[in-house]
Amino acid sequence: MKFSKFFSNIQETPWYRSFLNPVIEEVKTSGRLLDIGTGTAKLIQILTLEKSIECVGVDTDSNMLIEAEKKN
């Protein structure tokens, strides 16, 4: 299994959402966000769906970006 797929699966667990909640709570509704080192883009997925944020994610690992495309 590729690390990107493994990491993507971890991001779907309830504890990972708890890990992201402090960041999510600080982001205002609507606007734009650049996520540097986005990984598989779980944060982008949440902010887009729940806060109507326009997000762009960048990462140096192309496999992570492939997983990110599947989510968004």
Image (tube, rainbow, N blue to C red):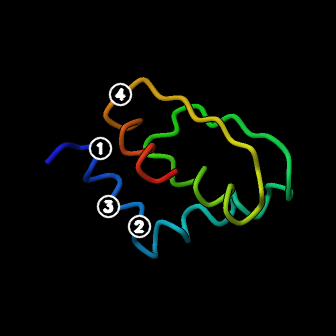
Q: Is residue 60 left or right of residue 57?
A: left
Task: Name the spot of residue 42 as percent of width and height, x first.
Answer: 51, 54
- The residue indicated by pointer 4 is 62
Q: Residue at x 29, y 44 (%)?
A: 4
Task: Name the spot of residue 55 as percent of width and height, x first.
Answer: 68, 41
* Circle nearer the N terminus (4, 2): 2
- The residue indicated by pointer 2 is 12
- CB atoms of marks 2 and 3 within 8 Å: yes
* Circle nearer the N terminus (2, 1): 1
Residue 16 higher or lower than 54, as above or below: below
How many other residues sit within 10 Å of disc 3, few (<14), some (14-19) or many (≥20)?
few
* Circle nearer the N terminus (4, 3): 3
Residue most extreme to the left: 1
Q: Secondary structure at mark 2?
A: loop
Q: Secondary structure at mark 1?
A: helix
* Circle 1: residue type: Ser
Q: Residue at x 23, y 43 (%)?
A: 3
The CA span between labels 4 and 2 is 20 Å
- The residue indicated by pointer 3 is 9
Residue most extreme to the top: 60
* Circle 2: residue type: Glu
* Circle 4: residue type: Ser
How many other residues sit within 10 Å of disc 2, few (<14), some (14-19) or many (≥20)?
few
Q: Is residue 32 left or right of residue 62?
A: right
Task: Name the spot of residue 57 as percent of width and height, x first.
Answer: 58, 35
Q: Is residue 3 left or right of residue 18?
A: left
Q: Secondary structure at mark 3?
A: helix
- CB atoms of marks 4 and 2 within 8 Å: no
* Circle nearer the N terminus (1, 4): 1
- CB atoms of marks 1 and 3 within 8 Å: no
| Picture mark count | 4
